[in-house]
Structures are given as C-alpha cells and as structure tokens.
Image (tube, rainbow, N blue to C red):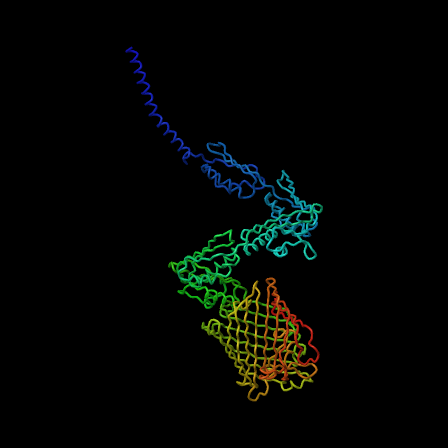
C-alpha cells in the first residue's frame, strides 16, 4: 500500500512538473508567433517586385499602362498600393476588365497585369431614319458615343434616349430604337448600328380632368402647356413638359389654399388607333384651408403692429398657402434688414385645425444685433474704376446696413448702363457687429460701333453710322474705358433728313459731383407735307452743359446753346411762312430742374419723372423769346410685369423785344408717333390756309398720354394707349375755349386711342402703334379720317 501511494505521488509530481513546463513554454510560443507575424507585415520582410508583365493589351502599350501605376520594379509589394493601381487603371477608361496577380520570381514577386481592352468604335451607322433630315455626320455629333473612341455601353443607352427625345419632339413618341454592336475580335474594333422603327405620329386626342370640384376643367386646362391636337397645335406629348404641368396644377391648388392636394396622371393609347393618346389627370383636392390666427414672438426692437403691417398675403381670413407665407417672411426680414438687423432670422410654425379648416401661424423672430458696414469691396469690375462705382453708392463704411440705401445704390448702378448684373453679399470682419459689404458687378458692353437703317413716320427711311462709348476715359490710352464718361459720334442720311452730331459728357468734373458736357451738331430736313414740314430746315450749332445733383432724386442743369438756322424752299402758296425765310442766329440760356425716382431708366416699372426748363433767348442772336417746357410722368406697377404710365406735357412760349412771333423752329408741334397718335405728323395745331395745310406750330401746347404695356415675352410688349391734347397759336389760347387757330370751340382738344407693340431687336427698339383719331384734323372739312399706323425704329446693329 505504501509503495502504491509512493508511485501515485511520484506520478502526480511528474504530471505537475510537466504542466508547469508547458505553461512556461506557451507564452514563449505565442510571443514567437506574434513576432513572426510582425515580421511578415514589417517592410523588412516584404518581398520586392522583381518583374512586371502586362497581358491582353493590344492598342495600349505596356509602357503606358505601367507608367500609370505606383508599383515599380525594385519596390516592395504592398496590397494597398496595388489596390490603388487597380482603381487608377480603371479610371483611364481603356479597359472593361483588369486583374492583378503575382507569382514568385527570382527571389521576389512578379506582378502580372491582365487587361481586357474596350473595343474601339470604328463606325456608327443608322437605318430606318426617314423623318430626321439632318445628315449622318451631324446626327453623330448629337450622340455621346464617338467614332475612334472606346465603346461604352452606358453611353449607348444615353444615345438611344437622345434619339428618342428627337422623335418625341416631332410627335413620334412610340418610335422604337435599338442598337447592334458588331465586334471584330481580331482587331478589337466594333461597328454600331442604330435601327429605328419610326411608327406613326402620336397625337394627344384628348385631356380629361377628373376630381376637380372647385375649379372648372377649362380653368385647369389653361394651366397646361401640353395641349390636345387641333388645327393650331400638333398635340405632341413630351414627358418633361407633362411633368411640369402636373407640378403647375399642384402649385395652383396650393396657392388657393388646398395644401393637401395630390395630382396624378395616366396616359393611354386608343385601343383601335394606338397613335392617339388620352391623358387623364386625376386631382384629389382635399380641404381648403384659411389662415386662422397670426402670432409674432421674439420681437423687441420692432413693434408687433409694424411687423403685422408687413404681412400682406397670409393674414387671418385669407387663403393659406406656403408660397404666400414665404413672401410674408421675406417682407418681415426686409423690415429688419432696413434697420440694420441683417442677421435677423424669422422662423415660421403652423398648426392645422382640420375641423375648422384654419391654419394658425406663429412667427418666431431672432433679432440678433445691429450690423454695421466695415469695408466696401468691389468685385467683377474689369474695365470700370472702383471710384465710378463707389460714387454711386448711398451707403458708406461705419453706417449700419440699410436696405433702402442698398436698393437705391443698386438702382443708380443699374441706371448707369455699365453693368448687366448688380448684386450684394457680405463677409465676416474681425469685429462681431461689423461685416464687409461686397458689391458684385457683371460688366456690360458699353462701347459700340453701329451702322444700319430704320424707318419712321417722321423721318421715313434713314441710314446711320454711330460710334459710342458710355464708359469712356480719355486718359486711359489705348483702351479709353473705365471713367464713366460718355462719348458719341453719329452721322445719318435719309430720304428727308441728314445729320451729324458729336457729344461728350463728364459726370464728375475734376472729381466733384458736377457734370460737364458739350454737343456739336448739324441737321437738315427737307420739305415734305406728309411729315409736317412746309419748308427746308438746316441747323448748325452746339451747346455747353453743366449739371449737379441737388438731392437724391433732384437735379439742376444749366445749358448755353448757339444755333444758326436756315429756313428755305417754303411752299409757294404759303405766305404765312415767308417771314421765317432766311438765316437766323439763336443764342439761348436754359436752366432746368428734373426729379427722377424711376427704378430703372431703361425698363421702368415704378417711379416719377418730372422735368421743367425755361429757354431765355436774346443774349445775342437775332431772336428774343422765353420758352417753358415741362413734363410729368408717373409709372404704376401692375400685376404680371405690366406698367401703366400717365404722362403730361406743357409748353408755353412768348416773344419779346424786337421779335413779334416765336420763330417756327422754336414753336410747339403735336400729332404723330410721339405726341397724339392717330393724326398726321405735326398736324395737330395751327395750319396754313394753302392747299397742303402746312403745320405752323404754336406758342402753347398741352398733351396728355395714358399708356398700358404688358410683356408677352422678354423682347415683346403689347401696349394700349389714349392720347389727348392740342397746340394753340397764342400763349393765352390754351386757357380759353378756342381751337388751335383761335376760333371759339367747346373744348379745343384732339384725342385718339389705339394699340401698339414694343419690340426689342438686335437693331434697336421698335415701336409700332395703330392710332384711331376721335376728332378731325385741323384744316380738314370732312369727317375725321380712319386709323393710322405709326412706326419708328432707332439705333442699329
């Protein structure tokens, strides 16, 4: 028993010792294994690239492929670099498949790049195309795929879409277009053939509106650009246009308060005639919502009453619409912006009460602090000097941001005519309550060399040549641009009139806000009773001009004019004009005032233009008279870009000293394209007693015009007008009930109305009016004549 116990203890001792030995060896083994692993990933144990081989390339050389890789012979082989090489080779666009393998080679690794090149497109052909008339070479230019380039299947799919769109525009939306790729494996080149089955022309037979309860089908159909086929419309279905139409219907309903509206459509072909389509538009109007309560929170510096006064579209009781609410938010932000809070944030939240159909709106305002202008930076001006732009700005460094001043500054810069676009931006400055103002401009072409021709009912046919630089700088040789000066030279020749003029204006003389300018001219006009001239007239002269802005909108000018005027070739039976015959020198000083608050002098939408001038003739010269002329225009902005202009003109002239009558070339005339339409040129007013009834003009004039213009397109406006007025022989007759010739009359006014077009063309603006007179012309014993066209075109190409 004792021996048995001894053996057992010995065995237990040996077993325990063995376990201890193993326990000590295991960490050592693990350490050795970890170290081995580290050696594998260590650069010291990486195998070098001993060779590189490219397989499968035919057109692309091996050197080109290897040059695009970062893996090089002699460098260590690393999987991450090889992975990048693989991506880099794919981006070349030359290969449809790439594999990179390795094998042991001369104590290192041989990198094997196996590529499959994309086929090169050798030829693109078309079959079945009859309706597309363009030549194959031009048609190929419309495609993404190109001959001599690599084949790309996504591009082929895009080519099919392009061809299909071309057929859709012609009404063949069911045209079937497929392509076939013919690959020559020997030279890895391919031929592509597009096959077209054109089918019949597809037309929209009818458009059906369903689900509309509030608005008639006719009202909804007017919103659509997609139209059914009829005599004046091909009825072509265009998917993108129909998608826009659906969005337009949804937007229309939402503007009318139907916030939950859904609109869907379905297009079906006729069962017997597949080329006839029926479009069904399904409308689920939902409930109409009105604005409930409007609450303003967070305002401190501006009262709630002022804020609510800026809300015009989304107010209690009116239709609720997201678009209208966004406009109100812009109005509130504008209120804060005008007072320097350009970082003010207005956030809206709405609660919809489905039972009452009301939407309660809460505006939460975070005013932030007033922000001041730190620096003003001008960007985008390449030709125009910074000074020219800065002197038009009405906001200056150190002032708080003021929306009204910024708007006025933009109007002034736009009215210069030097820039196509003017916009603002801000950037941070070192001080938290200041920001830099960035003025971005996009310069327009200010210089022009024009020549061309035109026609008007005043001058008939006329040709001209003109050189003008509206942003002239006489110091900036050889470009002569950038200082804001205006230089123009113009010569014209025509059936009735010829002329030459040279004009120069410096808006800031010696960098002071005083303008200086001069004009030199020579004008002739031949006798023609059809345009109101009973004599030949030649005018040679010039003037000097000074001007200054008195306030933001008020300006004063002073001009001295010296003219030599020659009147000849008077109608033989017109004895009333005999005293006007011969040469006379006219010396005139003209002070004037003008008030101009128009938003855009080139395309006015709102504002006023008031001008008044008085001619004092007699400081030298042969004639003595005073002459007043005033004009007042007010522009009313109307919906959809329309404008209503109300314009009035008044002229009064009085001779004095040795002059018995105001000379004919300084009298007032009316009638025709620019005064009272529907009447012959210059024929409203006193006329001679001879057979041709030559206009004699008068010492007083009053003309009123009302004109409504509506834009049809960007280049075309339609106009409706009413003109009224007259010219009187003596200055006192304007205030009495006498007609133009001084005979007692109940009213003494001539009027007309009509329609017209205003067209912007590359050769200049065109005005075409058809005026209908409501009274007979002076000198006419019969009833009033019918309507008359008035046409004028100015400037050229």
Residue 603, horizontal then vertical, whole percent? 56, 67
Quadrant housing residue 302? bottom left
Quadrant housing residue 24? top left
Report the front residue among 186 and 33. Answer: 33
Residue farthest to the front, as pictured: 355
- Asked if one can make out residue 332 in the rendered structure from this viewpoint, the answer is yes
Direction from residue 13 to residue 502 in the image, left or right = right
> Which quarter of the image is occupied by the C terminus?
bottom right
Q: How many marks?
A: 0
Q: Is residue 509 above or below residue 140?
A: below
Residue farthest to the bottom, as pictured: 658
Direction from residue 361 to residue 603 in the image, left or right = right
Residue 503, horizontal then vertical, whole percent? 55, 74
- Asked if one can make out residue 374 in the rendered structure from this viewpoint, the answer is no
Report the front residue among 738 and 117. Answer: 738
Residue 376, horizontal then vertical, whole percent? 43, 63
Quadrant housing residue 229? bottom right
Q: Is residue 519 above or below residue 412?
A: below
Report the front residue among 48 and 210. Answer: 210
Direction from residue 772 to residue 23 in the image, left or right = left
Report the front residue among 673 and 538. Answer: 673
> Which quarter of the image is occupied by the N terminus?
top left
């Amino acid at each position: 028993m004792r021996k048995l116990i001894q053996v057992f203890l010995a065995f237990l001792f040996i077993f325990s010792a063995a376990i201890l030995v193993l326990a000590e060896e295991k960490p050592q083994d693990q350490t050795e294994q970890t170290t081995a692993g580290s050696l594998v990933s260590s650069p010291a144990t990486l195998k070098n690239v001993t060779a590189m081989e490219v397989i499968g390339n035919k057109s692309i050389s091996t050197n080109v492929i290897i040059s695009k890789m970062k893996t090089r012979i002699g460098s260590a082989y690393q999987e991450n670099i090889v992975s990048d090489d693989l991506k880099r080779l794919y981006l070349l666009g030359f290969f449809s498949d790439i594999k990179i393998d390795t094998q042991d080679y001369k104590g290192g690794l041989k990198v094997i790049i196996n590529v499959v090149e994309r086929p090169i497109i050798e030829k693109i052909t078309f079959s079945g195309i009859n309706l597309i008339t363009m030549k194959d070479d031009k048609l190929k230019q419309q495609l993404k795929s190109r001959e001599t380039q690599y084949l790309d299947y996504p591009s082929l799919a895009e080519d099919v879409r392009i061809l299909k769109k071309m057929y859709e525009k012609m009404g063949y939306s069911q045209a079937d277009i497929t392509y076939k790729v013919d690959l020559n494996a020997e030279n890895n080149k391919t031929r592509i053939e597009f096959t077209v089955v054109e089918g019949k022309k597809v037309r929209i037979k009818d458009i059906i509106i369903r689900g509309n309860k509030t608005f008639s089908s006719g009202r909804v159909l007017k919103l659509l650009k997609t139209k059914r086929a009829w005599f004046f419309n091909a009825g072509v279905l265009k998917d993108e246009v129909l998608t826009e139409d659906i969005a337009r219907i949804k937007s229309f309903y939402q503007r009318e308060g139907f916030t939950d509206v859904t609109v869907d459509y379905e297009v079906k072909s006729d069962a017997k005639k597949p080329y006839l389509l029926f479009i069904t538009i399904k409308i689920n109007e939902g409930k109409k919502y009105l604005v409930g309560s409007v609450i303003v929170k967070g305002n401190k510096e501006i009262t709630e009453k002022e804020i609510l006064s800026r809300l015009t579209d989304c107010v209690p009781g009116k239709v609720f619409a997201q678009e209208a609410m966004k406009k109100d938010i812009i109005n509130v932000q504008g209120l804060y912006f005008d007072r320097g809070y350009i970082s003010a944030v207005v956030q809206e939240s709405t609660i919809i009460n489905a039972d009452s159909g009301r939407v309660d709106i809460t505006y939460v305002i975070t005013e932030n602090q007033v922000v001041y202008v730190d620096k003003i930076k001008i960007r985008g001006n390449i030709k125009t000097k910074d000074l020219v732009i800065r002197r038009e700005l009405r906001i200056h460094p150190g002032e708080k941001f003021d929306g009204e001043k910024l708007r006025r500054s933009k109007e002034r810069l736009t009215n210069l005519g030097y820039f196509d676009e003017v916009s603002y931006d801000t950037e941070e400055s070192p001080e938290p309550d200041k920001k830099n103002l960035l003025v971005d401009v996009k310069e327009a072409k200010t210089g022009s060399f024009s020549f061309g021709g035109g026609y008007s009912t005043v001058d008939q046919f006329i040709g001209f040549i003109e050189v003008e630089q509206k942003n002239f700088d006489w110091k900036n040789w050889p470009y002569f641009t950038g200082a804001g000066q205006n230089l123009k030279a113009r010569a014209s020749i025509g059936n009735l009139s010829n002329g030459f003029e040279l004009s120069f204006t410096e808006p800031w003389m010696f960098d002071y806000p005083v303008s200086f300018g001069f004009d030199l001219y020579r004008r002739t006009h031949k006798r023609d009773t059809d345009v109101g001239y009973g004599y030949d007239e030649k005018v040679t002269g010039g003037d000097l001009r000074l001007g200054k802005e008195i306030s933001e909108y008020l300006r004063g000018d002073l001009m001295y004019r010296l003219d030599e005027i020659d009147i000849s070739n008077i109608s033989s039976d017109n004895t009333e004009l005999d005293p006007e015959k011969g040469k006379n020198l006219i010396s005139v000083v003209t002070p004037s005032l003008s008030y101009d608050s128009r938003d855009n002098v080139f395309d006015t939408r709102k504002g006023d233009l008031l001008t008044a001038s008085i001619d004092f003739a007699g400081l030298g010269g042969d004639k003595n008279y005073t002459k007043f002329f005033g004009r007042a225009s007010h522009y009313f902005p109307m919906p959809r870009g329309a404008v209503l202009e109300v314009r009035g003109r008044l002229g009064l002239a009085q001779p004095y000293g040795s002059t018995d009558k105001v000379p004919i070339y300084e009298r007032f005339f009316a009638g025709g394209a620019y005064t009272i339409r529907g009447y012959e040129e210059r024929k409203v007013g006193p006329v001679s007693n001879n057979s041709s009834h030559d206009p004699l003009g008068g010492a007083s004039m009053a003309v009123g015009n009302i004109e409504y213009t509506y834009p049809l397109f960007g280049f075309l406006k339609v106009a409706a007008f009413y003109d009224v007025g007259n010219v009187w022989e003596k200055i006192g007759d304007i205030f009495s009930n006498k007609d133009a010739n001084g005979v007692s009359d109940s009213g003494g006014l001539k009027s007309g109305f009509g329609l017209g077009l205003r067209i912007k063309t590359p050769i200049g603006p065109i005005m075409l009016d058809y005026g209908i007179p409501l009274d007979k012309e002076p000198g006419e014993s019969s009833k009033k004549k019918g309507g008359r066209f008035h046409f004028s075109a100015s400037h050229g190409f």
